[in-house]
Amino acid sequence: MTDSSTFPDPVYRDTVLAPLFEGAKTHYAGHLRAINRAHLVMLAETGILLGVTAAALARALDAIDAEIDVEGLRYTGEHEDYFFLVEAELKRRLGPDTAGALHTARSRNDMDHTVFKMALRARTDALAGQAMDLAAALIETARRERDTLIVAYTHGQPAQPTTLGHYLGAAIEVLLGDLARLDAARAALDHCPMGAAAITTTGFPVDRHRMAELLGFEAPKQNAYGCIAAVDYVTGLYSAIKLMFLHLGRVVQDLQFWTAFEVSQLYVPDGLVQISSIMPQKRNPVPIEHLRHLASMTVGRCDAVVNTMHNTPFTDMNDSEGEVQAAGYAAFDSGARVLALLAALVPACRVRSDRVAANMDAACVTITELADTLVRAEGLSFRQAHEIAAHTARAVVRAGTALSAGFDAFEAAFRAEAGRAPGLSPAAFAEAVAPEQFVARRTRFGGPAPAPMDAALAGYDATLRTLRAARAARLERIEAAATARDTAFARLTEE
């Protein structure tokens, strides 16, 4: 039996309040400090609090911030959480009436949602910065490998030649799209709940726009009920993060496949390879496996947050608060590890051109261009050309020869289908099935030839610059708000 006659019940203290207190130390105290200072400045500026009261509160808050070692605190149950610890300290220093004035026109409801938004925006800005760095590394690598041939696979089978630059361009486009989604989700964090109070605002003449400004938000969130009840800023953000790592995980899976001994299209340098403890011939690209499971863990952590919101009431509730937010921060941690490792891995890898050439020859991956050439040069229908190409591919595979040496098989297939000799010479045939020629002919918008690739890379650079500029503007606004808030607060302490 435990004593449940006084708050907090020991079990409730140990299972809920103490873990929340420990988890909140890394973010809550700092953001609460900013909110307390901004709120006090706003109360003084609007005349809701007299100057003498505001000054006393400012000096007491300053002393509390200087004297309390938040990291060193251990939860005892004496105060429900850090908010009440600060309130108790104010009462001890100023008496209950003056201390209680700080909480005029606000609630734990609007404060908690503001804290969460401030914590999430800091983590989101950091994660977005890392993702932008990854995008920059991929763009640089794609530019370097613009003309480096690789085998493109569909359904797990060799399909056509392309270049590593073209493949990475596809991944870059997805990542930039994910960054745009993250940017849109980040915008929802830029609307401040302060002033909503419990759920309907307050009868005091608070200045919600000033509060938003002092805390570095773009504006207050308009509907007071939504400030407290809506969790779309949580679900939207974690959904955007989930998609980023789900999509990156697909690229990681390709990297794993390309390093397999039977494919060996990609060489991972020794610094990113572990050797078997018993089989010395094995080069295990273990970091790729870590990338895969860390990306999956990030996806799962995001799902856990979003799914917790399912079938919850549209009102103030704990389901979207401390425990869930603390669990969700782990998604940022594992996601950051993925972004850092992937940004180091991809530029360090090199394509094994000898293996690419061998796989291309063995799989006849340029046969599509032969069919296209026959349509253009011989005046055949595509269906006829496709049949000739198919017979040629089967013959050279059966003979175990390279497609570039398969002119005799091609000529026989052409005569059988078209009833005449081909106009294509052996040299023209060899050119038509050369991987370099295959890529060079793909000059259409979005293709792997140099011209469309250069245009694509320039576009990716421009998009990334726009995203970086938006992030920099947000960071600048937050920094400027902190300076303005501290300056206004300091003036209060001097009155």
Image (cartoon, helix red, strand yellow):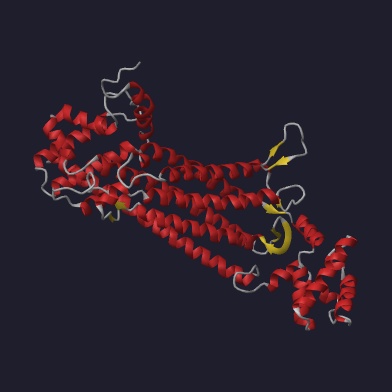
**Is 103 rendered above or below residue 214?**
above
Which residue is found at the position 27% from the left and 39% from the top?
33
Residue 394 seen anywhere in this rendered image of the structure: yes
For the image shown, how many numbered marks are present on the structure?
0
- Quarter assignment of residue 52: top left
Residue 125 seen anywhere in this rendered image of the structure: no
The spot of residue 337 in percent (x, y) is 53, 43
* Quadrant of the rendering where the C terminus is positioned: top left
Foreground residue, 433 or 155? 155
Foreground residue, 394 or 437? 394
Which residue is found at the position 44% from the left and 48% from the top?
238
In the image, 407: left or right of 41? right
- Quarter assignment of residue 181: bottom left
* Quadrant of the rendering where the N terminus is positioned: top left
The spot of residue 331 in percent (x, y) is 47, 43
- Quarter assignment of residue 494: top left
In the image, 474: left or right of 101? right
The spot of residue 174 in percent (x, y) is 54, 59
Which residue is found at the position 14% from the left and 46% from the top?
44
Foreground residue, 285 or 326? 326
**Is 402 rendered above or below residue 483?**
below
Which residue is found at the position 64% from the left and 49% from the top?
253
Residue reaching furthest to the top: 1
In the image, 389: left or right of 242? right
The spot of residue 304 in percent (x, y) is 47, 42
